[in-house]
Image (cartoon, rainbow, N blue to C red):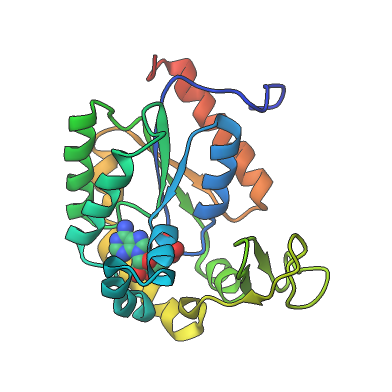
């Protein structure tokens, strides 16, 4: 377990994909891994929301798909991730959160990583019970200023609708409403779940339960990461 290890521990190489349905806790876990192991978290959802907010050409193209809970076309996503991975700070590793989401994206990622000479160390699937996922998504609220996330029941802010950290208003993501959630979960099952077999055949798929509280899930993830180190996949 990660127990007695230094918080700024830095492994030599950590190229990780987090796989899992919306609401399973990928974003939270990616943030915790990123802080502990000092590697960047790359969330395609966040990159798209930023593009949308700034009305960039990508944001304008992505808007209609995101609003319906559908996937943004593969070629746009592969180009986005290629640009980000070839950018600053990814040489020693990264955690991909929300990419790939289709077999075509996984093949695109293989090509990019071959060029970077940085093979994936681990694809970690987080699994949770559907009723837990739906409850999490429907109750999720985010700060419109700093992005901190809350939950109406499990992690409410001190003052209703206001961020504890910066005092800004909280909002609900449009795609966290009941009808869009159903579509996102269907899209996940049909288009993303086949990745489980794609990576399992290569022997780099790990699975962890996402039903528990975030820090408990994180402890289990750290145990898996340390085993990989011990097994000598990297170095
Ligand atoms: P997320 O924050 O990961 O739940 O992503 C929010 C939305 O962004 C998704 O419902 C999709 O519309 C879009 N999106 C994020 N990542 C991808 C991806 N890898 N491929 C296609 N669409 C994506």
- For the point 43% across and 17% down, the residue is 231
> Residue 223 placed where, x, y %?
57, 30
Q: Is residue 183 above or below residue 199?
A: below
> Residue 28 placed where, x, y %?
57, 52
Q: Is residue 60 above or below residue 85?
A: below
- For the point 56% across and 46% down, the residue is 31
Residue 188 visible? The answer is yes
- For the point 63% across and 37% down, the residue is 219
Instruction: Using the image as rendered, state which of residue 139 and residue 134 is in the foreground.
Output: 139
Quadrant housing the C terminus = top left
Q: Is residue 172 left or right of residue 40?
A: right
> Residue 116 placed where, x, y %?
23, 30
Q: Is residue 62 left or right of residue 114?
A: right
Q: Is residue 73 left or right of residue 47?
A: left
Would you identify the image quadrant in which residue 222 lies?
top right
- For the point 49% across and 34% down, the residue is 39
């Amino acid at each position: 377990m990660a127990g007695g290890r230094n918080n700024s521990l830095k492994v030599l190489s950590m190229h990780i994909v987090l796989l899992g349905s919306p609401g399973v806790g990928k974003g939270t876990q990616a943030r915790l891994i990123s802080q502990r192991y000092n590697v960047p978290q790359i969330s395609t959802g966040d990159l798209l929301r930023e593009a949308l907010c700034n009305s960039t050409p990508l944001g304008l193209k992505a808007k209609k798909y995101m609003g319906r809970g559908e996937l943004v076309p593969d070629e746009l996503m592969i180009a986005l991730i290629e640009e980000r991975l070839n950018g600053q700070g990814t040489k020693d590793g990264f955690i991909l959160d929300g990419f790939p989401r289709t077999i075509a994206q996984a093949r695109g990622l293989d090509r990019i990583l071959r060029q970077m000479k940085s093979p994936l160390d681990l694809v970690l699937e987080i699994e949770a019970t559907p009723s837990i996922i739906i409850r999490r998504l429907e109750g999720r609220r985010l700060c419109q200023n700093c992005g901190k996330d809350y939950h109406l029941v499990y992690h409410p802010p001190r003052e209703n609708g206001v961020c504890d950290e910066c005092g800004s208003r909280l909002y609900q993501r449009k795609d966290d409403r009941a009808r869009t959630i159903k579509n996102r979960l269907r899209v996940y099952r049909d288009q993303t779940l086949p990745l489980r077999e794609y990576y399992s055949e290569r022997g780099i798929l790990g699975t962890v339960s996402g039903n528990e509280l975030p820090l408990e899930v994180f402890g289990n993830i750290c145990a898996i990461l340390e085993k990989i180190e011990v097994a000598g996949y990297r170095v």
